[in-house]
């Protein structure tokens, strides 16, 4: 069940990123969009690391 949540979150990151970037204009909105972009990248990296950890734990449990 946890793996499903991680992969669902990982699938949502690019979609949210596109939504966030589509509304950006020059100025403060662009900066806000870049901040959201950075946050989404970090969230995606965190989800990927969590997925790797879960996979490693599953492999260790089989051994």
Image (cartoon, helix red, strand yellow):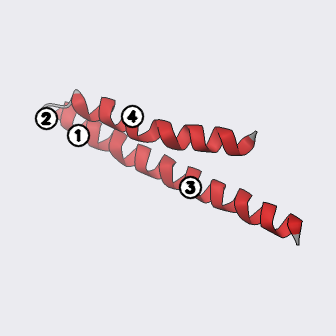
Tell me the quarter of the picture where residue 4 sits: top right
C-alpha span from label 3 to label 4: 16 Å
Residue 56 against residue 50 in the figure, above or below? below
Residue at the extreme top: 23
Q: Which mark is residue 27?
A: 2
Pointer 4 residue: 15
Q: Nearer the viewer, mark 3 or mark 2?
A: 3
Q: Which mark is residue 48?
A: 3
Identify the image quadrant of the N terminus: top right
Of mark 3 and mark 2, the one earlier in the sequence is 2
Of mark 1 and mark 4, the one earlier in the sequence is 4
Secondary structure beneath dot 3 equals helix
Q: Residue at x 52, y 44 (%)?
A: 10
Pointer 1 residue: 31
Q: Residue at x 56, y 39 (%)?
A: 9
Q: Which mark is residue 7?
A: none
Secondary structure beneath dot 4 equals helix
Of mark 3 and mark 4, the one earlier in the sequence is 4
Q: Are marks 1 and 2 in contact (CB under 8 Å)?
A: yes
Tell me the quarter of the picture where residue 50 sits: bottom right
C-alpha span from label 4 to label 2: 23 Å
Q: Position of residue 26 (x, y in %)?
A: 11, 35
């Amino acid at each position: 069940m946890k793996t499903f949540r991680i992969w669902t979150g990982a699938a949502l990151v690019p979609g949210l990123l596109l939504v966030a970037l589509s509304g950006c204009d020059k100025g403060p909105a662009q900066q806000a969009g870049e901040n959201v972009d950075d946050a989404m990248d970090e969230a995606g990296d965190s989800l990927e690391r969590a997925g790797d950890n879960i996979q490693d734990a599953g492999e260790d449990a089989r051994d």
